[in-house]
Image (tube, rainbow, N blue to C red):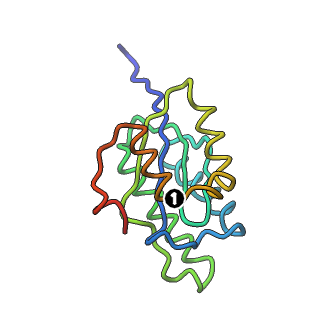
């Protein structure tokens, strides 16, 4: 085979350190645009980025040239620096150490897009912790609650 081709869609989820409510409605659109730019620079096509005040969901096409952990590392590192540069009140902003990455089949992309787009409504009835546990269980990811949060 002469060409190496891939289309790997992933749903990435991570929160703020200690689930603090850093991500105001004013900062979110700019943050998501910045994150999309970081993804593009590392050859990952952003599909949709959304979330609420304490966490982010990213739906993107993973580059065949980068491991998922590296993509998350780059997005978190650069976006953390960006958030801190916005205002002195963000000086202690941090993302949580962990993250979740879940595969998404082509047939489910629209479902995940809707899910991310409806985060505000979704979190009126469910906490980030409950949502994240449900995502882990849905995708068959084993976890130890003692190490899930920071």
The residue lying furthest to the front in this view is 125
Residue positioned 45% across, 38% down in the render: 63
Vertical placement of residue 78 versus 7, above or below: below
Residue positioned 40% across, 55% down in the render: 99
Q: Is residue 26 left or right of residue 86?
A: right
Q: Quadrant of the C terminus?
A: bottom left
Residue 29 horizontal/vertical position (percent): 69, 60
Vertical placement of residue 40 versus 144, above or below: above
Residue 94 horizontal/vertical position (percent): 46, 72
Residue positioned 43% across, 38% down in the render: 138
SS at circle 1: helix
Front residue of this view, candidates 57 and 147: 147
Residue 97 horizontal/vertical position (percent): 36, 64
Q: Which residue bears the numbered disc 1?
A: 128
Residue 52 horizontal/vertical position (percent): 62, 60
Front residue of this view, candidates 9 and 116: 116
Label 1 environment density (alpha carbons within 10 Å; few <14, some 14–19, many ≥20)? some
């Amino acid at each position: 085979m002469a060409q190496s081709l891939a289309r790997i869609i992933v749903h990435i989820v991570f929160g703020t350190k200690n689930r603090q409510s850093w991500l105001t409605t004013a900062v979110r659109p700019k943050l998501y645009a910045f994150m999309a730019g970081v993804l593009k620079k590392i050859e990952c096509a952003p599909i949709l980025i959304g979330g609420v005040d304490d966490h982010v969901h990213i739906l993107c096409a993973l580059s065949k040239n980068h491991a998922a952990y590296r993509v998350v590392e780059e997005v978190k590192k650069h976006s953390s620096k960006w958030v801190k540069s916005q205002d002195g009140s963000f000086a202690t902003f941090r993302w949580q150490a962990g993250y979740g990455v879940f595969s998404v089949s082509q047939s489910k992309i629209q479902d995940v897009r809707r899910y991310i787009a409806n985060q505000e409504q979704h979190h009126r009835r469910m906490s980030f912790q409950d949502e994240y546990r449900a995502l882990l269980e849905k995708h068959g990811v084993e976890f130890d609650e003692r190490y899930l949060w920071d």
